[in-house]
Every structure is written in structure tokens, then in C-alpha cells.
Amino acid sequence: MSSLDDGGISFSISNDQQNFRLFELPPSLLELIASEHPPSLYLKSEQPNSGASSAPAPTAVICSNDQTFEVRQVQSSNILYIIQPSQTSSGNPREPSSLSGVTAIGQCKALLELVSVQTQPVQFLRNTIPIYNEKKLAPDIHRWIPEFKNKQALLTGAPFSIAEFEAAWTELCAFEIDDEAWRPSASQLEEIWSSFMTATTIRGIDVTNAFQYTGRILTVEEDCWDEAMPHAILRRISSDHENIMEGWVLIDRCKCVQWVGQVYLEVLCCGNKRAPPNFVQLWQDHLPERWREDAKLDLLQALSTDLGNGSAIFKGQSSTATNQDVRVPAAVTTSKGKSKWHEKFKATRA
């Protein structure tokens, strides 16, 4: 008859217990970690006095380049031991020998569970980044923001991934001047866009096709807008952010038409919530001639209620972004193999 000593595994508990935390990973994150080129992961939490909404934020999050996972502690009624292989004495002085077994070096009474969450980066940055004030005379802003931060400082304290941050930064037309982060108001966006349309028309630039980006040429010189501001708008409505850095712009028709409508709806509805009866016509007047017919209130359903006859009611604050938070476009995470349309365009003009 066999005994436990003959066929069992030696088990012991170490007096020197170590501290462990076990993570339960979702399949999507496990796949990333187990891939040939695993991405860097970042442990982040929302910093106090960030100006974010009063809704409770996750205590901590773990971020990949384009995803955010909330860290939750899950208690367990079971005892989970962390073990490692060990050698123990047989205990027989007449026939001394060692036995292979396992030793418990720690216990885990709780697990850390990672859960994919839908973040609200646009709302976070809208409440965190102050509206641009050229003279910086804004005591009401300084009352709730301890200090003006730059983009990198905001990213460090933002409880979501880099790609989600960049998408929200672009959505709000945020920019930096003198190492300080700002976002424009709807009225500022309206003025810059009008200046841009005037300047490009005077210079014979067709903005419905690809054109070269040359800084101050984008606005009327007398308006004296800092170059960072029209540049932020072009990032918002362009088809390819990377090519703007290389001096070429291709405005996305759908993005542009909808964005211009959002801006003018907010400006015209300021104070009374109701747009004028000729709102759609005013919207069309601020678009390139070829795109006028694209201006339809269906594009602004998230922000307005259609009253018919070209009139609408503004539902709430926009501040240059849709009321629905942005999603990270697939192109953000995969830049290899992108077609260099600007090079092809230059070749056709040679």
C-alpha cells in the first residue's frame, strides 16, 4: 500500500513571506504583452486639482499606447499561495536524502483586475486647459488652476493613453505658446477661420486640394494670430497630421464642413441657445464654394435640434469638440506603410 511519503509532493511555508500582487489581464492586453514586440505600459492616476469633472475617476489606470485599463482590487475568500520549487530533507537520520517539493513564499488575499474602460479625454482636457487669453489677464482661470502647464505635464497627469490624449488634444484644437497649453474659444476659432479663408482666397490658394503650409500665409497678417493657433485648426480638419509637419496640408472635406458648422453654431447661439433662421446659409458662406452644399443640420445632431427652415437649437457646450468623446482612429497606432500623398502631389506639379 503506497503512502503519502512515497507518492506525494513535499509542501512547506516559508517564515519569510514576500509581498505579491497578481494581475488578472484581459485577453486584449495579454495578447499585447505576449506579442513579439510588446509595448510599454504606464501606471497612471488622475492628479488632484486637475479641474476635471466631479464624476469619480479611477484610482489608478494602466495604459498601453492606445488603450486604458482601470485597476480594480478584487477580494477573494480563498487563500492563494505563491510557491517555488524547493529541496527538503527526508527526515530519516539513518538514510539522509533530499526530497523535491514546493515552498510557499507569499500569499495573495486580493487580485488586481484590469478592466478596459471608455475614457473621456475631451471632457478632461476641456476642464483642464484654459481658454487662450492673449494678455493672460484671467484671474478666474488662476483661481482653479494652480499653474499653467505645458502639453507634456498634462499628458503625465491625464488618466488615459497617449493616443487618446493626442486625439482629444487635436479635437479641441489645443496648442502651446511659451511652453503653456491653451485651447481657443469658439469665437476665437471663428475669427481665425475667417482670417484663414480670407488669406487663402487673396493668395489664390485652393483649400479643397492639397496646398503648401507656410505659416503666416494661413491668416491675414493684420490679424496677428500666433502661428500655433491656425496650425492647431489645420491638424483638427486635415486628413494627415504628419504631412502638416512636412509643410503640406490636405483638408478633409467631411471633417471641415462639420467642424465649421459646430463652431458657428456655438458662436451664433451664445446666450440664447437658438440659432438664427438663416444659420445653414451662414454656415455655407464660411465654407469653400465647392463644399457649400454639404452643410446640412444632420451633421450636427449631437449638438443641435433641427427646427426646420435652416434653424436649430444648440443643446449645450461644445467648445470646438463634439459632445460625444472622441475615439482613437486606427491610423494613430499604425504609421508604417503610409502613402506619401504630398510627394505624389509635388511630382504632378513638377
Image (tube, rainbow, N blue to C red):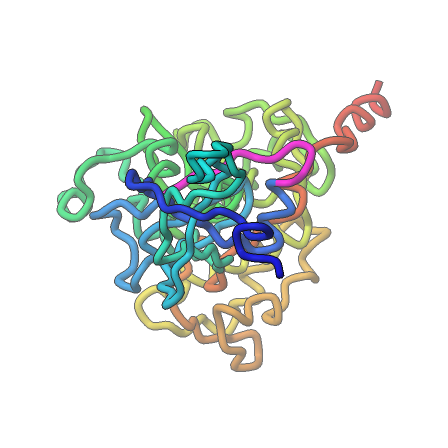
Residue at 41% across, 63% down: 268
Which of these two is toward me, 38 or 214?
38
Residue extending furthest toward the bottom: 307
Residue at 68% across, 61% down: 294
Residue 67 falls left or right of residue 107: right
Residue extending furthest toward the front: 94
Residue 317 place in picture, x, y as percent: 37, 63
Which of these two is toward me, 261 or 241?
241
Residue at 42% across, 60% down: 318
Question: Can residue 190 be spotted in the picture?
Answer: no
Residue 108 falls left or right of residue 290: left
The total of numbered circles placed on residues is 0
State yes or no: residue 43 in magenta.
Answer: yes
Instruction: Please determine whether, in this image, residue 343 is positioned above or below residue 284.
Output: above
- Image quarter hosting the C terminus: top right
Quarter occupied by residue 201: top right
Question: Can residue 142 be spotted in the picture?
Answer: yes
Residue 121 place in picture, x, y as percent: 43, 52
Residue 195 place in picture, x, y as percent: 49, 39
Residue 90 place in picture, x, y as percent: 47, 39
Range shown magenta: 34-44
State yes or no: residue 152 in magenta.
Answer: no
- Image quarter hosting the N terminus: bottom right
Residue at 30% across, 62% down: 56
Which of these two is toward me, 283 or 171?
171
Q: Main secondary structure of the magenta part?
A: loop
Quarter occupied by residue 274: bottom left
Residue extending furthest toward the top: 350
Instruction: Please determine whether, in this image, residue 26 is positioned above or below residue 242.
Output: below
